[in-house]
Image (spheres, rainbow, N blue to C red):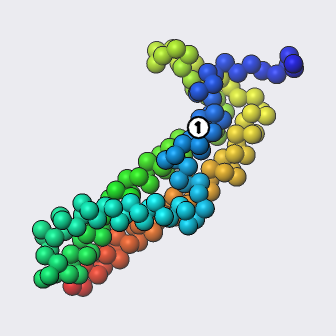
Amino acid sequence: MNSSAPVCPVPAEQQPINEYQELKESWFFRWATLELKAYLKPTFTLWLLSWLIAAPVAAVSFPPARYPIQFFLSGAMGALVIPSLALIRLYLGWIYICNRLSQETVFYEESGWYDGQCWQKPAEVLQRDRLIVTYQIRFLLRRLQLTFIVIASLILADAMVWIFL
């Protein structure tokens, strides 16, 4: 055993590397790590399932028989709410881990909210954590940001079509 290695006082479940592993293996947050087709499938599925809520609401305002375009546009925009909320939750989880890994110090609680401490990461731990951020997490964050841009573009396109009706 190397006695010169610094002892990490942070509880295992609060160590950023373990939080990262836990997030990466969780059924929900793993969604962002999937290949593109597998990543888009649950997003699209959520959008389709959201129509179960959005369609009746849109139908009350715009009966499909009389206003098919308005019905579709309002339903499509309303159906984007649930996938957007899921993607926001994904983003918030990954950005939290990104920040924890990037920081030079780790805030942790020893036994409760009232006794927080900070631990200065040794250079090799900080370097390892920042490599994970650079080569793993930033890609996921960019993917999620691009997804938000696509959703915002769809909403903008929906609004532009709406204006010309």
Q: Specify whether 122 is left or right of 38.
A: right
Within-10-Å neighbours for mark 1: few <14, some 14–19, many 20+: some
Residue, disc 1: 22
Please tell me which residue is depicted at 52% across the width and 46% down the height of the picture: 27
- Kindly state the secondary structure of the residue where label 1 is placed: helix
Name the quarter where the C terminus is drawn.
bottom left
Q: Percent x, y for residue 122?
A: 75, 28
Type of amino acid under label 1: Glu
Q: Percent x, y for residue 103?
A: 63, 36
Q: Specify whether 105 is left or right of 110.
A: right
Tell me if residue 140 can be seen: no
Please tell me which residue is depicted at 22% across the width and 67% down the height of the picture: 55
Tell me if residue 62 can be seen: yes
Q: Specify whether 62 is left or right of 47.
A: left
Front in this rendered view, residue 14 or 51: 51
Please tell me which residue is depicted at 63% across the width and 33% down the height of the picture: 18
Front in this rendered view, residue 56 or 165: 56
Q: Percent x, y for residue 5?
A: 82, 22
- Please, is residue 81 above or below residue 112 in the view? below
